[in-house]
Amino acid sequence: MNSSCNFVIFGGTGDLATRKLLPSLYYLHCDGYLPGHVKIYGVGRSDYNDDSYRNFIADKLKQCESLGNCKETSWQEFSARLFYQKVDGTKTEDFSQLGKRLALKEDNELVCYLSTSPNLFGDICRHLNEAGLVKNNTRVVLEKPVGHCLKSSRIINDAVAKIFVEENIFRIDHYLGKETVQNILALRFANSMFEPLWNSREIDHVQISISETVGVEGRWSYYNDSGAFRDMVQSHILQLLALVAMEPPRHFEPDAVRNEKVKVLRSLRPISGAQVLRNSIRGQYSAGSIDGQPVPGYLEAEGNVANPQTETFVALRAHIDNWRWAGVPFYLRSGKRMSSRNSEIYIQFKEVPYSIFSKSNSSTLRPNKLIIQLQPEEAITLTIMNKVPGLAQKGIEMREVDLNLNLSAEVRKETRRMAYQRLLMDIIHNDTTLFVRRDEVEAAWTWADPILEAWQNSAETPKPYAAGSWGPSAAYALTEKHGHSWHDEYARKRKD
Ligand code: BG6
């Protein structure tokens, strides 16, 4: 075991650090997973000292829901491992001060988590190097988004690559830390029954949908430029798509997994020009209500800060051009201020080729579906057709039933409270399997850029949808014109 691992969070007073990173580190500590040799340094431009920073973080932790089973003494122990150093990311001398403070010995490890604007990534890496803080075992963690387009992502990646080798760069996509997301790999590659069905002969179409009830949460300057497509589709949704569609990797180890993911991203059929407008819908929420509470529209934000061109909803029809997936549409969708918080991967199989049941009853036969729900519950459901019990004499009456594997009940004892916990542990243990490699980011932007460009050149603005709905009506037409329905619409009809 190394004598110490210094985990330095740049942007240590920011939203991500205080809402996700420090609570995750704290939970790891409470649950006994944070190795004893890890010390945490919050770094930022504000004037805190160790004590005032600890008080600041203690207040933030009180706002977290899952502190329940953290022991009274846990905070005392954790805070003794927590420090603060004032650093302005643009000032070389501040990095020398940081170096003095860390006083690294030869066998000490350093992790630099850059929870800052991506524009600062290159400068921070350069300053770290100039201050003599970058050694062979120094790791850097980059929060998304890495860039705004292919060109800007290359500039950032080049700047970071001047200082760090790829094996020491951890690009975070926190969706890869979610329990059910990793379970996609277990489901596909630890069970033999799915693989023969996992292709265009058996699968009709796939939907990957992340809907949120929250809005922009004060992050106007970021979101106005980013919009739902860059914020959610280019990163989280494409990562989910890659895991669903990839070939089995040789081993569960970093490059084997990432080699297969990048092949999928590179096989995404390019969509450009007029095809973009035919295969995508952008929306922006207007006033509505969420959980019975009135919610103002995106453009009604205080201070007129919202950009009328920014999409808060996006739906697309994508294709993967390879042998396994030829002809299978992948519908991708994400939106803010939607009817409910729900993230899921929905896989619809083909219908039976021929029904042996009488016409009146066979009309009720429905294709099987596999639904991998990530949020709010972690669950896997397989729908099958089943005979309605009873003594009816005229043939067999059918109904669709769910075979349900509810993971939260099964794994409650071992469950993590935040996706970041898994990823922070992997950074500490130097395992890059669940992190995004440079070529993946670039393949994702290569597909995304022409879509963004077509929207930019189009006179169309995002279509309005009421907050609390499932997005603009045109998003329904996107699936329906190809004979498909979004799963929520299907589930609603099935209930009615
Ligand atoms: C972040 C996006 O990456 O993911 C946010 O920037 C979004 O806009 C969030 O709200 C969603 O994450 P989760 O884990 O709550 O689904």
Image (cartoon, rainbow, N blue to C red):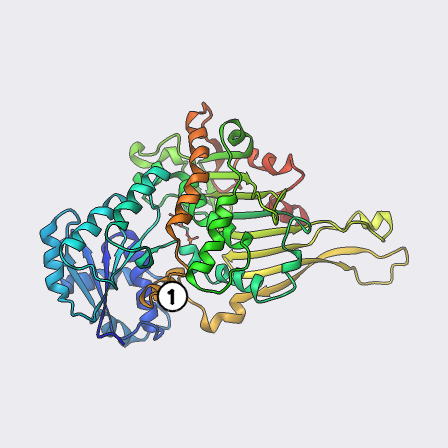
Label 1 packing within 10 angstroms: few (<14), some (14-19), many (20+)? few
For mark 1, give the secondary structure. Answer: helix
**Residue drawn 50% across and 70% down?**
411
Q: Name the quadrant containing residue 231.
A: top left
Residues 271 and 251: in front is 251
**Amino acid type at mark 1:** Ser
Which picture quadrant has residue 327? Answer: top right
Residue lying at 14% horizontally and 53% vertically, measured from the top left: 130
Look at 32% across and 55% down and name the residue there: 166
**378 horizontally vs 483: left or right:** left
Tell me: residue 474, above or below residue 386. above
Evaluate whether residue 496 shows in this view.
no
Residue 467 in the figure: left or right of residue 90: right
Q: Quadrant of the N terminus?
A: bottom left
Using the rendered view, name the quadrant where residue 53 is placed. Answer: bottom left
Q: Is residue 229 left or right of residue 29?
A: right
Q: Is residue 69 visible?
A: yes
x then y, percent, for residue 271: 51, 34
Percent coordinates x, y for residue 202 in the rendering: 68, 51
Give coordinates of residue 282: x percent, y percent: 48, 34
Question: Nearest the camera: 395 or 87?
Answer: 87
Q: Position of residue 347 (x, y in %)?
A: 61, 52
What residue sits right under mark 1 in the picture?
66
User: In the figure, 55 relative to 325: above or below?
Assistant: below
